[in-house]
Amino acid sequence: MRLGFIAVLVSAVTAEVSTFFKSTDFDRGKYGPYPHKSYVTEPDLISPRHNIQQSNPMCDDGMYIMTSLRGDKVKPEWKSPMIHDTSGNLVWMDPSYGETFGLSVQRYKGNDYLTFWKGDDSLGHGEGTYIMLDASHKQVYNFTAGNGRLGDFHEFTITDHGTALLTQYRYEEGDWGIGLRPQGYIWDSVFQEINIETSEMLFEWHAYDHVDINKSDFPSGSSGRNRYSGYDFFHINSIDKDALGNYLISSRYYQCLMYISGTNGSILWELGGRRNSFTDLSDGKATKFGWQHHARWTADHSGITLFDNGARYKLKPTVDHSRGVHIALDLRAMTATLKTSYINPRKIISGSQGSMQTLPSGNILIGYGYNAAWTEFSADGEVLCDVHIGSQKFFNTGAVQTYKVLKFPWVGRSTTRPKVRSVGGWVYVSWNGATEVRVWVLRGLNEDGGELGVEDVRIERTGFETKLKVDCGNWNFVKAVAIDANGTALGESEVVTVTCEDPGIFDIILKLTSYGWIGLLFNMTILVLVAAGIYSVCKCIIRRRGYSTLHQIWT
């Protein structure tokens, strides 16, 4: 359906500035560790406000930023898989999923899906299930790891053959140590390749069966000495399968990558770590990485990319920054060469988590995991765009985290109706997850619900929620119609009453309470004023009662 009317095109006025640009107040913590915003049309949605430190048109490629926020200062009801555009505007979120990991776009049976893990991550690894949503954000798949066991959050990759690569942590008995009681308990690192439809296990590998547990770079301490704890000696955190049918895996606690035979599970070679198989042609810079994440083959299988944390929380770091690295490999000569390093201009160092993604343009996207920030680089390492999603003052505190930051094209077509609300003569409109909306058409209706016979108001979509002043004197009711780039109507909202009154004091209070430290300060001020008022009233009553008693005595 196409709209055949001539509409008035006006510019939108957003409800508030949702994105900061080079804000020192943001990074000094003025707005709290997690600056965020709420929405008039979607009051249950609370999304982060970005601080864009550096921008470049080369980052505006039409793709979207995928995050799954968590952290000590992110309330449970605020946690959600989230999609933002490159300007920092929310596109979609669904807080009903709560804490999730690894939001991504993956192709399966000819269709694109939003994919992520959901479950319990309280032990430093996960026990949960894998979720796949279609373009309407409807859940189509929710499956476990092989043999009905719960899966871990570190990896969920759909292969070109339509199978899934997953990680697991198994609590089992294990032996290690010299001169100590050998019996102990471990969290064994396991990876599987499974059939998505049936969860049938096609391949499984256990670290405990293939490595010397005594060679781990992570000391056991007191863990694993009784039934109440397990020693996580290996810590698998990524898997990538190549065309030869073999698997590239990352072991954080052996500080190396291992290339695993897809036939018998043997370790064919190792890159980095104590048993490095390669001659380093870059004076150690290619093989000396530590506590790394997200290892991937390059598209031409000529090298590997990974996020080099260089640090682990609770251990003293030996470097002053984390980095993304591209390592070229010669698998015949068994040599490794550092091709490019990608270093944040503020030299962020992250003791856990992190990601490195090569984009279709050749640009590189680095996510800093334990610190909620990301940077997009050119292929040769030039910083193009740099964004903070949490205050820099609270980096390395665990306040705001996102395990990975990824970027993908996505077309979302919501099956819900657009949301519209009128407050104080303003009309607010949004449509959670609908990526194709370019223009909103607001249509005024009279008190009988009939059209007014005046021109509709046509307004360009600006961000997640668009705001416009309307004629309160003539418009009794309003509805919004979503229009795509071709002029096609995608959907329309319910009809709502146009409200000309300004919001009441209680609405203002509720709005202010969502603004981090500002809300906290406001609440404290209100409490102080209320307490002062109660104190004054009580004091007055006591004085009056005292005077009355004295008067009776004197008389």
Image (tube, grey):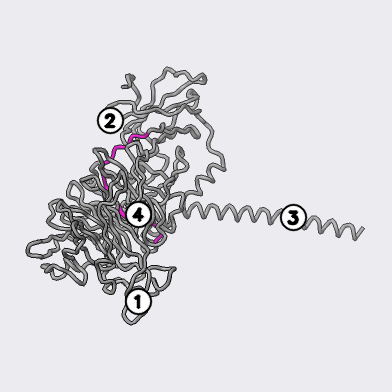
Q: CA distance from mark 2 to mark 4?
A: 41 Å
Q: Quadrant of the N terminus?
A: top left
The secondary structure making up most of the magenta span is loop
Question: Picture coordinates of residue 94 (x, y %)?
Answer: 41, 43
Q: CA distance from mark 1 to mark 4?
A: 28 Å
Three-letter amino acid code at disc 2? Answer: Ala
Sequence-wise first label, 3 or 4: 4
Q: Is residue 469 left or right of residue 1?
A: right
Q: Which residue is mark 3?
A: 540
Q: Which residue is mark 2?
A: 485
**Circle 1/circle 3 CB separation < 8 Å:** no
Three-letter amino acid code at disc 1? Answer: Pro
* Circle 1 SS class: loop
- Crowd tier of the residue under label 2, counting other residues whose Cα lies within 10 Å: few below 14, some 14–19, many 20 or above: few
Q: Which residue is mark 4?
A: 151
Sequence-wise first label, 2 or 4: 4
Q: CA distance from mark 3 to mark 4?
A: 65 Å
Three-letter amino acid code at disc 4? Answer: Gly
* Circle 3 SS class: helix
Q: Is residue 204 left or right of residue 304?
A: right
Q: CA distance from mark 1 to mark 3?
A: 75 Å
- Crowd tier of the residue under label 1, counting other residues whose Cα lies within 10 Å: few below 14, some 14–19, many 20 or above: few
- Tell me the residue at 36%/43% (across/down): 90
Q: Which residue is mark 1?
A: 182
| Mark whose residue sits in front, 2 or 4 | 4
- Front one among 494 and 95: 95
| Mark whose residue sits in front, 3 or 4 | 4
Sequence-wise first label, 1 or 3: 1
